[in-house]
C-alpha cells in the first residue's frame, strides 16, 4: 500500500452507535445489555440516584439534582423535562461524534416521558440519526399512564427519525396468565436487547452481503415516524423454515400482517460458516411473500463463528414510506473522512416569502428568515 493510500485509510471514520437508557425502565434495559456485552457503547440517564447507584455501568448521567433532590420525577412529566433541560450540557457531551443514537425508554413515567423529547431534540441538533425504542404501558396501569405515554410519543416524533413502539400488552399471550411479574415486565427489555444487539452485530461488519449505516439512514429518513422490530432464532436442519414461521406469527408484527402491509423493510440475517444460500432464500421469500410490489427492501447477511448451527433474523418494518419533509443534506452519514461542515439548505425551493429580496437576518451563522423547522430539520407531526 502506498503512503498516500495509508494516509487515506487512516482518515476513514467508522460510524458510531450509542445506546442511551432514560428513566427507570430504560436504565434497567441498557444495564442488562451492558452485562451481556460490556463493549457496548452505552450511557444511562435518570433523576433517581438510587437507580444510578445500583447500575453497574460507568457512563451514568444524573439529571435534575436541584429539581428532584436525587429522587425520581414521581410521575411528573414536567419535572422530567426540567431536569434534563438544566443538565443538557452533559447530554450534549455524550452526543459528540455520534452517528446513530438509540434511545431506550419505558413511557408513562415522569423522567422518561419528560426527558426523552428533549434528548431527541439535542441529538438531532448534534446531527445524529435518532432511533427511539419505547415500551408502552400495560392496560392495567390505567388510562392516565397510557395518555402520558401517547402524549410523549407525539413529542418524541417531532425530533426522532423513527420510533419503534413496543406495546407490553401485545407481548403477552393468554397462556401467560401464570407468568411472574418480573418476567412480564422484562419481555420488552428483551425485545430492546435483541434490536440493539442485532444492529450492533450487523452494522460494523462487512458481511457476506453488507448492511451498512447508509441503509439504516435511508430507512429512518423515509419511514415517516414509526417502525416495528421483530426477531427470531432457530437451530438445526429446519432452522430457516422455523425462523420464517416465527416471524410470520410474531406478536410485534401483528401475526405477520405488518409484513404484508409494510412500505419499507430492513432484514438482517446472521448465521455461522454453515449458512447456506437456500436458507437465505427461504427467509427472504417468506418475508416478501405478500409484500406490496412497491415496497423498499434491503437486507444484509453476516457470518459469525458463534452462530455455528444457528440462524438469527431480524426485521425493521416501516408503517409508511414518504419522502423526507425537509432536506436533510446536512445530516447525511459520513463514512469516509471527517464530518463535513453543514451544507447550505436549498432556500430557493423552500422560499422566503416577503423576505426574498431583502438582506438576510443572520445570527450565529443561521438565516433567521428561514422557518425554524427547515433550519433545524424538524419533522412536523402529520
Image (cartoon, rainbow, N blue to C red):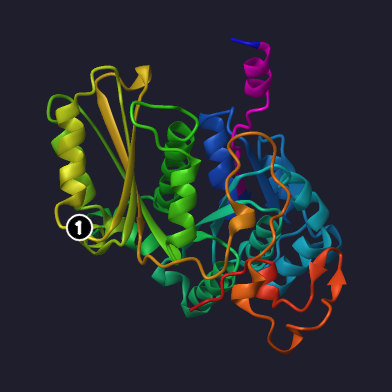
Q: Secondary structure at mark 1?
A: loop
- Percent from the top left, x then y, of residue 199? 45, 39
Nearest the viewer among 242 and 220 is 220
352 magenta-colored: no
Q: Nearer the viewer, residue 360 or 216?
A: 360
Which image quarter: residue 174?
bottom left
The magenta-colored residue range is 3-20
Q: Is residue 177 visible?
A: no
Label 1, on which residue? 291
**Farthest residue in the bottom direction?**
354
Up-down relation of residue 352 to residue 345 (above or below) = below
Tell me the quarter of the picture where residue 310 sits.
Answer: top left
Relative image position of residue 356 (x, y in whole percent): 73, 83
Residue 285, percent across and down? Answer: 16, 44
In the displayed structure, does residue 67 sit left or right of residue 313? right
Whether residue 292 sits left or right of residue 114 in the image: it is left
> What residue sits 71% from the left and 74% below the top?
78
Tell which residue pokes out farthest to the top in this image.
1
Residue at x 17% of width, y 31% of height: 279
- Decide whether residue 14 is among the magenta residues: yes
The location of residue 247, given as percent across then percent down, is 23, 48
Which quarter of the figure has residue 361? Answer: bottom right
- Check the image and report above or below for 317 versus 14: below
Amino acid at each position: 500500500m502506498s503512503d498516500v493510500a495509508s494516509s487515506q485509510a487512516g482518515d476513514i471514520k467508522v460510524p458510531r452507535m450509542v445506546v442511551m437508557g432514560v428513566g427507570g425502565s430504560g436504565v434497567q434495559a441498557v444495564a442488562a445489555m451492558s452485562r451481556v456485552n460490556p463493549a457496548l457503547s452505552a450511557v444511562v440517564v435518570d433523576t433517581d440516584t438510587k437507580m444510578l447507584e445500583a447500575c453497574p455501568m460507568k457512563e451514568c448521567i444524573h439529571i435534575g439534582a436541584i429539581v428532584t433532590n436525587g429522587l425520581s420525577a414521581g410521575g411528573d412529566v414536567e419535572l422530567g423535562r426540567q431536569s434534563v433541560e438544566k443538565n443538557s450540557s452533559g447530554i450534549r457531551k455524550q452526543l459528540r461524534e455520534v452517528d446513530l443514537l438509540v434511545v431506550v425508554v419505558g413511557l408513562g413515567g415522569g423522567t422518561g416521558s419528560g426527558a426523552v423529547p428533549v434528548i431527541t431534540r439535542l441529538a438531532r441538533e448534534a446531527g445524529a440519526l435518532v432511533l427511539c425504542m419505547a415500551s408502552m404501558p400495560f392496560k392495567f396501569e390505567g388510562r392516565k399512564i397510557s395518555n402520558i405515554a401517547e402524549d410523549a410519543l407525539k413529542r418524541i416524533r417531532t425530533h426522532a427519525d423513527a420510533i419503534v413502539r413496543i406495546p407490553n400488552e401485545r407481548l403477552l399471550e393468554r397462556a401467560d396468565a401464570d407468568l411472574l411479574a418480573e418476567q412480564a415486565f422484562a419481555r420488552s427489555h428483551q425485545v430492546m436487547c435483541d434490536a440493539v444487539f442485532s444492529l450492533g452485530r450487523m452494522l460494523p461488519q462487512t458481511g457476506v452481503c453488507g448492511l451498512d449505516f447508509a441503509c439504516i439512514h435511508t430507512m429512518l429518513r423515509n419511514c415517516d415516524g414509526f417502525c416495528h422490530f421483530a426477531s427470531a432464532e432457530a437451530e438445526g436442519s429446519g432452522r430457516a423454515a422455523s425462523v420464517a414461521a416465527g416471524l410470520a406469527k410474531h406478536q410485534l408484527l401483528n401475526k405477520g400482517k405488518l409484513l404484508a402491509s409494510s412500505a419499507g423493510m430492513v432484514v438482517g440475517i446472521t448465521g455461522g460458516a454453515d449458512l447456506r444460500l437456500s436458507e437465505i432464500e427461504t427467509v427472504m421469500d417468506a418475508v416478501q411473500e405478500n409484500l406490496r410490489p412497491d415496497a423498499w427492501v434491503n437486507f444484509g447477511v453476516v457470518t459469525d463463528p458463534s452462530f455455528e448451527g444457528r440462524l438469527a433474523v431480524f426485521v425493521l418494518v416501516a408503517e409508511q414510506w414518504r419522502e423526507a419533509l425537509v432536506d436533510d443534506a446536512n445530516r447525511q452519514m459520513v463514512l469516509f473522512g471527517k464530518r463535513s461542515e453543514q451544507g447550505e439548505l436549498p432556500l430557493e425551493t423552500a422560499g422566503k416569502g416577503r423576505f426574498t429580496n431583502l438582506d438576510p437576518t443572520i445570527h450565529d451563522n443561521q438565516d433567521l428568515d428561514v422557518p425554524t423547522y427547515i433550519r433545524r430539520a424538524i419533522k412536523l407531526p402529520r
